[in-house]
Amino acid sequence: MSTTSSVTTSTSTDAYGNSYTTAVSNDSLGSDDFITLMLTELKYQDPTNTVDSDSMLNTQLQLSTLEANTATVDAMASLQSSYEQSALSNSAAIIGNIVENGDTDDEGNAKQYKVSSVAMKDGNISLTAYEISNYYDVYSFNEVSSDSAIVDSTNEDSSLTLTNSDGKTYNFSTYDKTYADLATEISKTTGMAASMAQNSNGNYQMVVSVSGGGSSVSQNKLALSYSQDSATAYSSEAKTIAYGNITKIY
């Protein structure tokens, strides 16, 4: 047995004392290896039974074709890998965005999801997302030294009006009421909540949240300052969404 350019060959001797190749072992024969083998075969061929040159050329042509096909397959695999990495990188841009995938709730409204991560498996991109269960408008009113501070002790008609996303209004009298009392009254209204929160300065703020978003605040004979923000509530269970099923991105 001998090895040439990583090609392992096995030889035997015929009845005339001539050596000939009985086996060749290599997973990646190249053109150079074939030429070496061909020359070796010619060197040790039986003079009474010479090798067919046409057959050898056909074999070399088949080997060249096989090498070309193998190179094409390798190039396609590399291209596919590059495409998948690019697609994954591009899809990662929607992490943190709100998406829709065609799902609807019992009332026919489109469900919305916030994307937390993306992944690829077997060439398919999927998203891990959490369904949005509700939107809230959050109003933080001016600071007071105590939750027992009176909202307004001078105007009997003073009031605070909250309008929800459906356009329904709720009027709350503020005359001679403490902030804590006003917060308790607001919290009794469906879709609204209010509490007195103590901030880092030791002062208190009445914080009101209105479910559904799209709400508004108005005041009558009252001039409370406040800031408005928004908040979102999510489902606690993650959902897997196929990237190709996304119909809308916010």
Image (cartoon, rainbow, N blue to C red):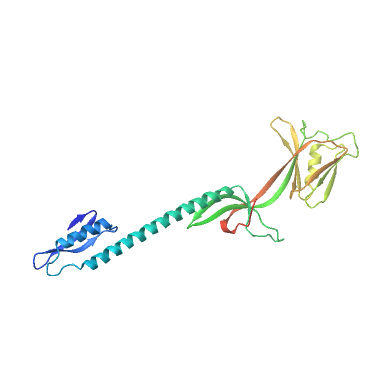
Residue 3 at x, y percent in the picture: 20, 55
Q: Is residue 57 visible?
A: yes
Q: Toward the viewer: 63 or 19?
A: 63
Residue 233 falls left or right of residue 51: right
Rendered residue at 80%/37% (across/down) = 179
Residue 221 picture location, percent across and down: 88, 38
Q: Position of residue 5 (x, y in %)?
A: 23, 53
The picture quadrant where one finds residue 201 is top right
Which of 134 and 63 lies nearest the eye of the viewer?
Answer: 63
Q: Is residue 7 above or below residue 160?
A: below
Please report the residue visible at 33 percent of the width from the left and 59 percent of the height from the top.
67
Closest to the observer, 71 or 123: 71
Residue at the right extreme, as displayed: 156
Task: Indicate the quadrant containing the N terminus: top left, top right, bottom left or bottom right.
Answer: bottom left
Position of residue 107 measured from the top left corner of the image (x, y, whole percent): 72, 60
Which residue is situated farthest in the left direction here? 16
Q: Is residue 178 above or below residue 113?
A: above
Give the total number of marks visible in the rendering.
Answer: 0
* Residue 144, above or below 1: above
Residue, x 50% and y 51% (percent of image)? 86
Left or right of 63, for residue 103:
right
**Residue 118 drawn above or below residue 146:** below
Instruction: Work out whether residue 242 can be spotted.
Output: no
Q: Which residue is rendered at x = 42% and y = 54% of the image? A: 78
Q: Is residue 170 left or right of residue 227?
A: right
